[in-house]
Image (cartoon, helix red, strand yellow):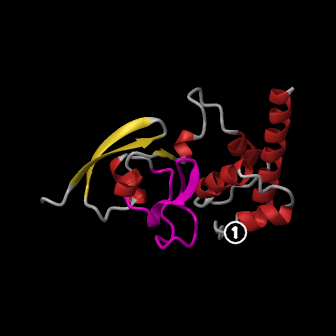
Amino acid sequence: MDHIRQIELSINGAAHAMSVEPRVTLLDALRERAALTGTKKGCDHGQCGACTVHVDGERTLACLTLAVQAEGREITTIEGLADGDGVLHRVQQAFLEEDAFQCGYCTPGQIMSAVACIREGHTGSDAEIREYMAGNLCRCGAYNGIVAAVRKAAGTHAAETKVEAA
């Protein structure tokens, strides 16, 4: 078919060459072509946040983004958060410690949004955290644990920032 495009996506710091039709979403490219299944397909309409990834550091709903739109940009998925030695990102660790997991289906998107929430400075109060995380739905009701995890990870981040500044 002549409408197939060859693209190369930079995902978690590695190049992934793939053939896609122009209508293939970033979510499907990640899951089906790059075999990165940590990003979940929830509603497939941008309403649940399960497919949240970072594109050039901004949280992005992968189900509403075409793969071809992401070419030339840096994509980070849940698989790319932990360091290469297997040490969890501080938000992943806080989710474990605060029992923010339920069934786990929404967790990757929640964690990706939580990282952005902290990075963008929206952790001034539990209400602010809840408002910023409102685009990610959890059908299991882990919201209290999620807010506690974001608060905990944000505190860790603030403490690390003070140490680095000193």
Which residue sits at x=48%, y=46%?
Answer: 75
Where is residue 13? Give x, y as percent: 47, 35
- Front-lying residue, 40 or 130: 130
- Residue 133 vertical position relative to residue 72 in the rendered view, above or below: below
The magenta segment is: 37-66
Q: Is residue 154 left or right of residue 133?
A: right
Q: Quarter-wise, where is residue 91 in the image?
A: top right
Secondary structure beneath label 1:
loop
Residue that mark 1 sits on: 134
Where is residue 73? Give x, y as percent: 44, 46
Of the 4 image quadrants, the one containing the N terminus is bottom left
Q: Identify the amino acid type marked 1.
A: Ala
Residue 64 colored magenta? yes
Which residue sits at x=43%, y=58%?
Answer: 27
In the orientation shown, which residue stands out farthest toward the left? 1
Q: Is residue 52 left or right of residue 155?
A: left
Where is residue 99? Give x, y as percent: 76, 52
Of the 4 image quadrants, the one containing the C terminus is top right
- Residue 116 vertical position relative to residue 3 in the rendered view, above or below: above
